[in-house]
Amino acid sequence: MNVMNERPALNSPIQPEDFPERSPLLRVENVHAGYGKKEVLQGVTLSLAPGEIVAVIGANGAGKSTLLKVVAGLIKPAAGRVIFRGEDITNLPTYRRARGGIAYLIQGGAVFPSLSVGDHLELGRAAARRGGRVSCGVLPFPALEDRASSAAGLFSGGQRQALASATILSTEPALLLADEPSAGLAPAAAAELLATLAAASRERGLPVLWVEQRVADVLPLADRAVLLRSGLVAAETSSPGDWLDGETLAHLTFGRGA
């Protein structure tokens, strides 16, 4: 019997019963990757369970965004494997990963300036090959309230990132890769966006691999936290709140033997 063939195909919707409890949805195994001759990831291994939010933190240059790009297929690893829903997708092109449910939320609020909120949500549904208009009234992002018919080019940075997040969620992904969605936002707008995105993800049972520099905001929202340092997993915890102490976090990020 081929067990791999019994797992859901990449293009089929993911269901909770597809995976036993604690079985990883995503596994990155001993991945080495970088840019040209510069190796950034030097053997990263981590996993993500269905419905789990995992925060990936670390100093600049630690390899956080590079890790997400490897999972999204934007960077091909020099060594190691990426396993998603039981399938080795290491050599799978980016568009096929997207069709299989891997969504990449980049920083900066990438939206179409001339399109409205409703237009963006319809595009998301079309990209997911699902029909029907999405009601703007059920959007979980307060920053978009009363802006359903406005062109995105008129939005503030926080509203653009909220719209980008809502568009991603409208595709009903199986995995969300969140790459510093709060970048460039004022502290209050950033905290509101992160909390709302986490709540919306939990409501949908959507697993998130979350890279974020606003550590104090993201750690309380996560189920687990992974610290990258110099391209390696230096520490991991299932109690992210324990890392909120400034002295502990500074030691983990910059100290030795963490």
Image (tube, helix red, strand yellow):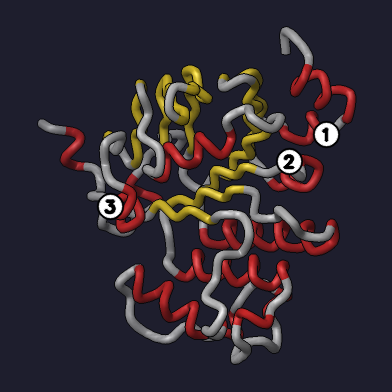
Give the Cα separation between the discs numbered 2 and 3: 31 Å
Q: Nearer the viewer, residue 101 or 62?
A: 62
Task: Identify the element where label 2 is drawn.
Answer: helix
Name the residue that disc number 1 marks.
Answer: 244
Which residue occupies 47% across, 28% down?
34
Residue 136 position, x and y percent, is 57, 84
Q: Nearer the viewer, residue 99 or 79?
A: 79
Task: Identify the element where label 3 is drawn.
Answer: helix
Instruction: Left or right? Give the position of 45 relative to 226.
Output: left
- Say if residue 137 shows up in the picture: yes
Lower sequence index among marks 2 and 1: 2
- Tell me whether circle 1 and circle 3 mark residues in contact (CB < 8 Å): no
Assess disc 2: are there few (<14), some (14-19) or many (≥20) residues with their C-alpha within 10 Å of its C-alpha.
many
For the C terminus, give its image quadrant. Answer: top right
Residue type (three-letter) at the residue carrying disc 2: Leu
Q: Which mark is residue 225?
A: none
Give the Cα separation between the discs numbered 2 and 1: 7 Å
Which residue occupies 42% across, 20% down?
30
Q: Which mark is residue 219?
A: 2
Residue 56 position, x and y percent, is 62, 36
Name the residue that disc number 3 marks.
Answer: 96
- Tell me whether circle 2 and circle 1 mark residues in contact (CB < 8 Å): yes
Residue type (three-letter) at the residue carrying disc 3: Arg
Give the Cα separation between the discs numbered 1 and 3: 38 Å
Lower sequence index among marks 2 and 3: 3
